[in-house]
Every structure is written in structure tokens, then in C-alpha cells.
Amino acid sequence: MPDTYRKPTLDKDLDKIAVMEEATGLLNRSFVTPGLALVFIFLCAVISAVFVTGHPGAVVIVAAATIGAYMALNIGANDVANNVGPAVGSQAMTLGVALAIAAVFESAGALIAGGDVVSTISKGIIDPVAVSDPNVFIAAMMAALVSAAMWIHLATWLSAPVSTTHSIVGGVMGAGIAAAGVDAGNWPTMGSIAASWVISPFLGGLIAAAFLAFIKTAIIYQDDKIAAARRWVPVLIAIMTGTFSAYLALKGMKAIITIPLGTALLIGLSVAILSWIVARPVIARQSRGLENRNQSLRKLFGLPLIFSAALLSFAHGANDVANAVGPLAAIVHTAEAGEVASRVVIPLWVMAVGAAGISLGLLLFGPKLIRMVGNQITKLNPMRAYCVALSAAITVILASWLGLPVSSTHIAVGAVFGVGFFREWYTENSTRRAEYVSRHHINKDDDETSDTSNGNGNGRPDEQRRRKLVRRSHFLSIIAAWVITVPAAAVLSGVLFVILRFALV
């Protein structure tokens, strides 16, 4: 009899031990990612020490390399999510595949086309004469790097995708004002950057919504969806490949060769025609035997989304690596040469720090923002995600043509918002959609607009009118983060500059 009562107690104790072991394992894993990040930062400090041993200002360079590595990690954690988030959210690729593709192409873009010369004063934000003293300049660049990295780190923790470009712009502006006063700032440039806060996400959202409207009209709500897809999907793929070719020619390869906008557009047109010729038989073969429903259509957009994620990552690595290594390269040159130069050459080890940091930051901390952009703002499928990716490339080209300094983050997230808000409007106002659904007796699994952000819709007309397909809490928090990015980074940078200025004297 005693053994009978002892057994349940033993089982409970074993269960408690198993729970404790599981909790310990989870706790240990929570320390792995920051531990690896700290190891990377330490290795960057060691590598920089090896390269600058015996050089003037070696201590300052090692400190700047440590900060640059921290900045690169944060860029990877926050900014890269915009390139692969829609593809992951639409289930065109898994999170693991997206991380691998983005890491490889981000590094390739940074090392192949990242450039070897950058302006020491980012985008002409402050007057170089105002910070011509080497010690003042080094303190300003270090303050800008630290403030931008800290702000992006905070934004990532709060799940807010922000512009790393605007973060470093705010950092440079704040340090410049602290160093030389308000008159040192280039306010017309800051005005154009502020205008881009509104123009770029609005333009990105408008273009994404326009393409989604076309897909709905030309393909989704046609009686023979497969025949419509065979006609229009090759055209859409041609537009995508042509746009990305022009985008890469214009932005991604500018460090290797300068291509005028007209030439880039001709390159894009040529690639688009070739892609249409190739895509027609491929789509015809893929669509053979597919059922006449929306689930079948989604399969045709999967592969283009994978290519778009890779191309966006390459272009991002080529352009945004300068946010991490530009100020670092300027500090290295100033510390070694003892003078402030308007343009400096980026050493290979500095470029490697930026490329490796962006990729590692993506792998360690990127999944949080990838999930946010991919499926927490609004529900995406391959067709909607395609509209987001295409809108990002087209908007950058239009902005380059108009001479507007835009943020890839604002464009991509704005495109996600545009898709979501268009779906809300279309669901509430499209009588054609209601007639089509009623005529074909379509259930909610096959209806393009039936799903909601929380997945609890039931398909009734009164329920559809009440649906909000964009989460308002995310919309408001992200907009707020965008608005305060430059001021927050500027204030933090100004305070840090004062501290560093006294430390370096």
C-alpha cells in the first residue's frame, strides 16, 4: 500500500524537474544571441587593433570599430526585415531560407557594390568647415554612430521598423549642432529629408495598392482565373524583373559604375522584354492542371518573390552599409592623417565589419522585425507581397528621378500599409466583389479579402464592413517612431558629443 501512494508523488517530482530543465534551457538560449553579438563586437575590436597597431590614434580607431560593429548589428536587426518580411509573411519562403538568402546577398551587396569612397559628412547635413578640427570631427562622428545605433536598438526592441539612414542623419545633425551651433546645419537638406517621411511611404503605399487593384481586376475576379494568370503573370514578372534591373543599375551598382537614369531605364526595359519571353512558357507549364481558385494563383507568385527578396537584399547591402561604415571610415582616416577630408577611402577591413555585422545582426535579431513586417501589420499572401516588393523598387527609381532622399524602410512598410488599407476599402466598397462571391458561392478560404489580421472573420457582409485589416496599434506606433527618429537621434547625439568632447580633450 505505501508504494501505491509514493508513486504519484515521485511522478510529480520528476515532472517538476523536467519543467525546471526546460526553463533552464530556454533561459540559456536567451543569453546565446546577445553573447554571440558581444563576441562579434570583441572580434571586430581585435581585428581593428591588428590593422592599426602603431598608427596614430589607434585607441580611437579601435573604439570606433567597436561602435561601428554595434551599429552594423542593429542595421541588420531592423532594416533588413523590410526586404524579406513580405515574402516570409506570405509563406513564399520559410524564415530560415529568408535569413540565409538575406545574409548572403546583403554581404555580397556590401562587399561587391558597397563602394570604396564615402562622404565624411553624410548627405551634406552639416557644414564641413564647422567641424574642421580633427578632435571635434572624431567626437561628432562617434556620437552620431552611438546615438544612431542606440536608437535603432530601442526601435528594434519595440518592434518598430525605422530608417537607419534617418537615424544616422539625425545623429550627424545633433552632433554638428552641438559642435558649432544651429547655423552649422544644412536646413534645406533636412527639409527635403523631412518631406521624404511623408512622400516615400505614401508613394510606396499608393503604387502597391494600384498593383493589387490590377491583380484583383485582371486575374482574381475573372471567371477563368488560370487563363487570366497565363496572360498577365508573365507581364507582372517582366515588370518586376525590369524594375529591379533598373533599380540595381541605378542604386545597387553605383559604387562600381555610374549609370544615368535613362540608361538604367533602357536596361530595365530590355530585361523586362527578355523576362516576358522566358516567363510565358514557364507560367503556362506551372499553371497546367491547377484548379480555378485563388489558392492556385498564389503558387505562381512564389518564385518571383524569392528573387525579389534576394535582389532587394543585394541592393540594400550595397547602399546602406555606408550607414555603418561611412562614419567609421571617416574616423579612421581622420585619426591616422590628423586632418578632416571631404571624402575618404573605406579600408577593406572596415567594409568587412559592416557586411559581417549586418548579416549577423539579421541572423541573431532579425526574426522579430521580419514577423512584424511580414504578418503582424496586415495579412499577406504571395500576390500582396509581390505588390509590396515591386512598389519598393519602383518608388526608389521615381524618388531618384525626382531627386528625393527616401528611406527604403519607409517605402517598404508604407507599401504594406497601402496593401492593407486598400483591402479594407475594397472589402467595404466593392459591389463587384460581393456579386462575384455570391454568384460563385465562394467560401472564405477561397475569397481574396476574407482573411483578417487576426483570422477570425466569418465572411458575412456586416462582419466585413466592421473589419480592420490593418492593425491600428502597429500603424500608430510605427508612424510615431518615424516622426521622432531624427529628433531623438539628434538629441542623443548632441548629449553624447558633449561627453565625448571632454573625454577626447
Image (tube, rainbow, N blue to C red):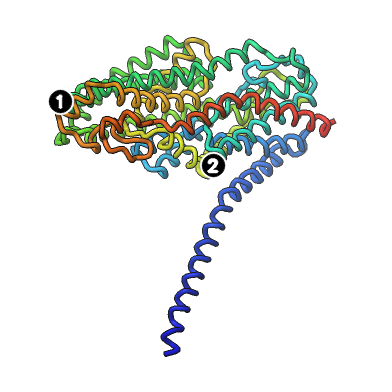
Q: Secondary structure at mark 1?
A: loop
Q: Residues within 10 Å of mark 2 (few under 14, many from 20)?
A: many
- Measuring 44% from the left and 22% from the top, which residue is drawn there? 248
Q: Residues within 10 Å of mark 1 (few under 14, many from 20)?
A: few
- Measuring 67% from the left and 31% from the top, which residue is drawn there? 147
- Residue 223 image label: 1
| Distance between mark 1 and mark 2 Cα atoms | 47 Å
Q: Is residue 68 left or right of residue 136?
A: left
Percent position of residue 395, x then y: 44, 18
Q: Which quadrant is home to the N terminus?
A: bottom left
- Residue 445 image label: none
Percent position of residue 285, x then y: 18, 32
Percent position of residue 8, x then y: 43, 78
- Measuring 51% from the left and 35% from the top, which residue is drawn there? 107
Q: Quadrant of residue 229?
A: top left
User: Between residues 427 and 152, which one lies in front from this camera angle?
Assistant: 427
Q: To which residue does mark 2 refer?
A: 360
Residue 352 in view, yes or no: no
Percent position of residue 451, x then y: 31, 35
